[in-house]
Image (cartoon, rainbow, N blue to C red):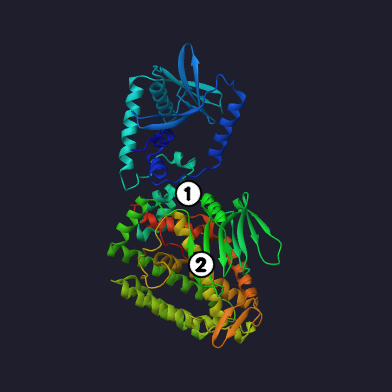
């Protein structure tokens, strides 16, 4: 059996769900608190006398533990293990410094390792809290050893489970937890109070704290020059293209690498992407999404939960209904918004709105996936029939779409939509892989093409706000050169190199736009929203569901 890390017992005592995420699902995030703790140990090692400061790794077969002890010293003829913490100690009611339960368990475990390694009895451990400069003694007695045995047993029990432990009832623990953006404890608490007719009331009862980051500071590196190569130079990506000077990009600034057409990436650069959890994606020169590479495949437990959930036909129907309704209401809101603007409240748009509204009720009552697809298809047909009338006359007839056509697109607007959907599919796939789910198993789309069904499912949430709206807006602002930004071959219309660069700029700016979630109540970028929706989807089969696909275009 694989030994437990002593530090995992610290997580266990702090929160069982944190232990499960780190030790079972192998998810760890080094935030500023973690880095501060590492810096503290480096500084202490420099300051202490080398004869006094002994730091080493130990492993115990008896306890099934392994760990690196901060410090071991001899005091009054006794061997004493030390733990250094940068924070403050706990306090009793009368103000006496005390050890935190998680720190106590950790130093007890180190004492057990030292005893087995040296053959000498350890009577106490010590924890130094540097924020308030106090030392707390921890007796190593029978009670301590009993607590350690109980904790190790509980850890082994959790390791054998597929289901995550519930969110802790102590909300204060979540505020300081580095895995809060993965665990989403506040959203889980809100979901418990959520009732379909009383969404807003439930949200008001539980005002969620912001534990999920509003934005991702990292950017996407698009490599569009044919024959360009992405290599590694230290901790930077080096992009070398024919007849161009190499460009260097610090790895900590990059969240994705997107290779367009016949650009390449080296093995060394791929390894750097693996180390930094950077997704790599390929698109054809024409804008078709080909696939992705990622270093991780998600934990076995996460995949088992996903497979069990998405082979349940009733659950899949419920999720598909919520997804289809979210897309339909997004399309309807877009038409309503556009119809309120001067010059675009045409009869065709008003008729499409009326027909779409008539279909919303039967869509929500659909009894099968097939009938749901039928209603959604009819709503989509009405929506795209109105789209040409959202384009202002000043934009020119050449930019007006002819309904929805693809494979290949036959007009400039549809060329923009198709290229945008390919970029969006890339980002949705990246979010699924980041969360650790399997993109191959979806609940709505069938596995009939190269695109992964789950990615196609989640794509429906973002088509209107991230592609349709900015495409029509850019056309009406006359941002496109009908000759230079497009290539026409017979009835086929594609974006030119310059057109793709222009579109990527529009799309990346849209990803950075902030949007306020109507239920959770926090604003976040569309880029982060994609990851949030994937995590909320996962909660649907973990007993914490109810928030997935609640986003609505206003």
Q: Are marks 1 and 2 in contact (CB under 8 Å)?
A: no
What residue lies at 36% left-to-right and 19% top-to-bottom? 141
Q: Nearer the viewer, mark 1 or mark 2?
A: 2
Identify the residue at the far top of this view. Answer: 76
Query: Compared with residue 465, is residue 533 higher up or lower down, i.e. above or below?
Result: above
Residue at 65% across, 75% down: 479
Task: Kindly identify which residue carries mark 2.
Answer: 424
Dot 1 corresponds to which residue? 181
The x and y percentages for residue 499 are: 63, 75
**Could you say which is closer to the camera, residue 482 or residue 53?**
53
Q: Position of residue 67 (x, y in %)?
A: 44, 32
Say what secondary structure mark 1 lies in: helix
At which x and y percent is residue 74? 49, 16
Relative to 96, is 393 above or below?
below
Name the residue rendered at 47%, 54% in the picture. Answer: 295
Res 269 seen here: yes
Q: Who is closer to the viewer here, 76 or 225?
A: 225
Number of marks in the image?
2
Q: Nearer the viewer, residue 174 or 534?
A: 534
Q: Give the label on residue 60, or none.
A: none
**What element does badge 2 sit on?**
helix
Residue 183 placement (x, y as % from top left): 43, 48
Judge whether residue 553 can be spotted in this image: no
Which residue is at the front of the view, 203 or 363?
363
Query: What distance separates the C-alpha of mark 1 from that of mark 2?
Result: 22 Å
Quarter the N terminus occupies: top left
Left or right, residue 460 beside residue 259: left
């Amino acid at each position: 059996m694989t030994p437990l890390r002593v530090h995992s017992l610290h997580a266990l005592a702090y929160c069982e769900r944190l232990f499960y995420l780190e030790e079972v699902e192998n998810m760890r995030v080094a935030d500023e608190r973690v880095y501060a703790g590492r810096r503290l140990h480096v500084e202490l090692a420099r300051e202490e006398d080398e004869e006094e400061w002994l730091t080493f790794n130990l492993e115990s077969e008896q306890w099934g533990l392994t760990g690196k002890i901060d410090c071991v010293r001899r005091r009054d003829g006794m061997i004493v293990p030390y733990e250094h913490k940068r924070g403050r100690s706990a306090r009793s009611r009368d103000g006496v410094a005390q050890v935190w339960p998680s720190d106590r368990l950790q130093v007890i475990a180190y004492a057990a390792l030292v005893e087995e390694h040296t053959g000498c009895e350890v009577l106490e451990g010590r924890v130094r809290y540097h924020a308030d400069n106090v030392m707390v003694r921890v007796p190593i007695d029978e009670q301590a050893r009993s607590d350690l045995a109980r904790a190790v047993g509980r850890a082994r029990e959790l390791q054998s489970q597929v289901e995550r432990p519930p969110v802790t009832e102590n909300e204060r623990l979540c505020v300081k937890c580095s895995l809060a953006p993965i665990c989403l404890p506040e959203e889980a608490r809100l979901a418990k109070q959520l009732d379909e007719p009383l969404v807003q009331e439930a949200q008001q009862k539980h005002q969620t704290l912001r534990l999920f980051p509003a934005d991702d500071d990292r950017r996407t590196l698009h490599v569009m020059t044919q024959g360009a190569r992405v290599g590694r130079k230290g901790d930077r990506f080096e992009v070398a293209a024919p007849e161009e000077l190499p460009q260097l990009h610090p790895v900590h600034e990059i969240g994705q690498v997107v290779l367009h057409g016949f650009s390449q990436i080296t093995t060394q650069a791929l390894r750097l992407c693996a180390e930094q959890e950077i997704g790599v994606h390929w698109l054809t020169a024409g804008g078709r999404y080909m696939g992705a590479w990622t270093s991780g495949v998600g934990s076995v437990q996460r995949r088992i939960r996903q497979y069990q959930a998405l082979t349940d036909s009733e659950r899949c129907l419920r999720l598909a209904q919520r997804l289809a309704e979210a897309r339909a209401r997004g399309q309807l809101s877009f038409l309503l918004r556009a119809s309120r603007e001067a010059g675009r409240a045409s009869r065709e748009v008003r008729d499409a709105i009326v027909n779409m509204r008539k279909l919303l009720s039967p869509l929500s009552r659909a009894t099968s996936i097939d009938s749901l697809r039928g209603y959604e298809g009819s709503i989509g047909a009405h929506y795209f029939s109105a789209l040409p009338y959202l384009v202002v006359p000043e934009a020119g007839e050449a930019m007006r779409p002819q309904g929805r056509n693809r494979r290949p697109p036959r007009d400039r607007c549809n060329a923009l939509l198709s290229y945008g959907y390919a970029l969006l599919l890339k980002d949705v796939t990246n979010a699924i892989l980041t969360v650790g789910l399997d993109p191959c198993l979806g609940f709505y789309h069938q596995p009939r093409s190269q695109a992964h069904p789950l990615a196609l499912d989640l794509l429906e949430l973002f088509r209107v706000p991230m592609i349709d709206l900015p495409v029509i807006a850019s056309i009406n602002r006359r941002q496109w050169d009908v000759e230079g930004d497009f290539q026409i071959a017979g009835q086929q219309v594609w974006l030119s190199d310059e057109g793709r660069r222009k579109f990527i700029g529009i799309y990346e700016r849209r990803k950075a736009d902030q949007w306020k979630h109507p239920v959770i109540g926090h604003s976040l970028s569309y880029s982060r929203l994609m990851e949030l929706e994937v995590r909320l989807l996962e909660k649907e089969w973990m007993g914490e569901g109810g928030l997935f696909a609640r986003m609505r275009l206003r």
